[in-house]
Image (cartoon, grey):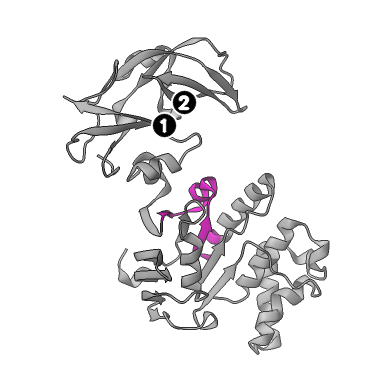
Amino acid sequence: MNAENVSVSIKELDLYFGSLGVLKNLNLDIYDGEFLVLLGSSGCGKSTLLNCIAGLLEITDGQIFIKGQNVTWAEPSERGIGMVFQSYALYPQMTVEGNMSFGLKNAKVPKAQIKERVDRAAEVLQIEPLMKRKPAALSGGQRQRVAIGRALVRDVDVFLFDEPLSNLDAKLRADLRVELKQLHHRLENTMIYVTHDQVEAMTLADRIAIMKDGIIQQLASPSEIYAKPANLYVADFIGSPSMNLLKGRVEANTFALGDLSINLDAYDFTRKPEGETWFGIRPEHVVTGEAAHGCDTSLDVVVEVVDPLGSDTLVLTRLAGEKFWLRLDGQSSVTAGDRLRIGISAKDASLFDANDETRL
């Protein structure tokens, strides 16, 4: 991607509330037609960054460009964005049609154009039968579709979503996630989406920016973040259950912790480890049964807890005295107290420096 493909560009952005730094020297380029997800736990700065892009917060330093225009001090209405909030923020006394057309009427858009835009958005979101209803007569999912429709009618290049599905139940969230992905494929607009839900991030995003303490920890595709987390925080944040992490030392291409030794000949080091090191492997990458004998390292563990989830089964064991999770097939017949042969391949592992917590 080159500069001509950049839709939103954030340069050296700082935001301070008094002496508290919320966003710090943040740089980010978001490309035309990209679905970028800002992901992190509460207080990491993701919604704050979205509000800065929208113009709802005045930044302390830095610049924001949208479609090549410097909008750092522009009003929200002048930025060419559509925004969907966590709360639907619909006018209760207005119909769906009224809610969707209200902003366009205020902007003095011609009536014929308003009707065309509202009809098109209603068709895309499949809410045509609801147009004469008021919000009180709609379900949560229908209200959120109307809120999305109100942003769509603005006919802008960039859409901002601030945790739009978090008020919905699990099944509805899953359904609307699919609809949002399809919507993005149809519209091909730039979409910036804030969430704390890693499943939403992994399924929706072209790229994910994982944030912590106002700093982007890793910016990459979902597959790269999953396979090669940039640091210990990202490794621990992504995955449910999260990556198994053991703290020991690397000596002569072997990770050692107490009596445990894991062969690292197949691991692709980016730099030589020095001192204490974190060894990480995801529960689904631990091999069990006869296949374990073909791995770099194989050993026996004792099952402590079995957590059946239907499609798969989570098993808690211990390795070198530390909790260690395995993900097995949903039909696995294991019970507490069973001994299991497990196998670990270094190519599936991640190693992190214990001092700066970055990937080795």
* Secondary element type, mark 1: loop
Give whichever of 261, 93 is nearer the camera: 261
What's the residue type where badge 1 is placed?
Answer: Arg
Tell us which disc is closer to us: 1 or 2. 2
In this orientation, does residue 40 appear?
yes
Disc count in the image?
2
- In the image, is 16 to the left or to the right of 328? left
* Secondary element type, mark 2: strand
- In the image, is 233 to the left or to the right of 91? left
Crowdedness near tag 1: few (<14), some (14–19) or many (≥20) residues, C-alpha within 10 Å: many
Q: Quadrant of the N terminus?
A: bottom left
What's the residue type where badge 2 is placed?
Answer: Trp
Verify whether residue 200 appears in magenta.
Answer: yes
Q: Quadrant of residue 187?
A: bottom right
Q: Quadrant of residue 130?
A: bottom right
x and y percentages locating residue 51 in the rendered image: 51, 69
Q: Which residue does the numbered mark 2 point to in the structure image?
A: 325
Q: Are marks 1 and 2 in contact (CB under 8 Å)?
A: no
Q: Which residue does the numbered mark 1 point to in the structure image?
A: 282
Task: Decide: is 81 above or below 162.
Answer: below
Q: Quadrant of the C terminus?
A: top left
x and y percentages locating residue 285 in the rendered image: 41, 28
Q: Residue at x 54, y 60 (%)?
A: 184
- In the image, is 323 to the left or to the right of 98? left
Task: Decide: is 129 above or below 201.
Answer: below
Q: What stretch of residues is rendered in magenta?
A: 184-213
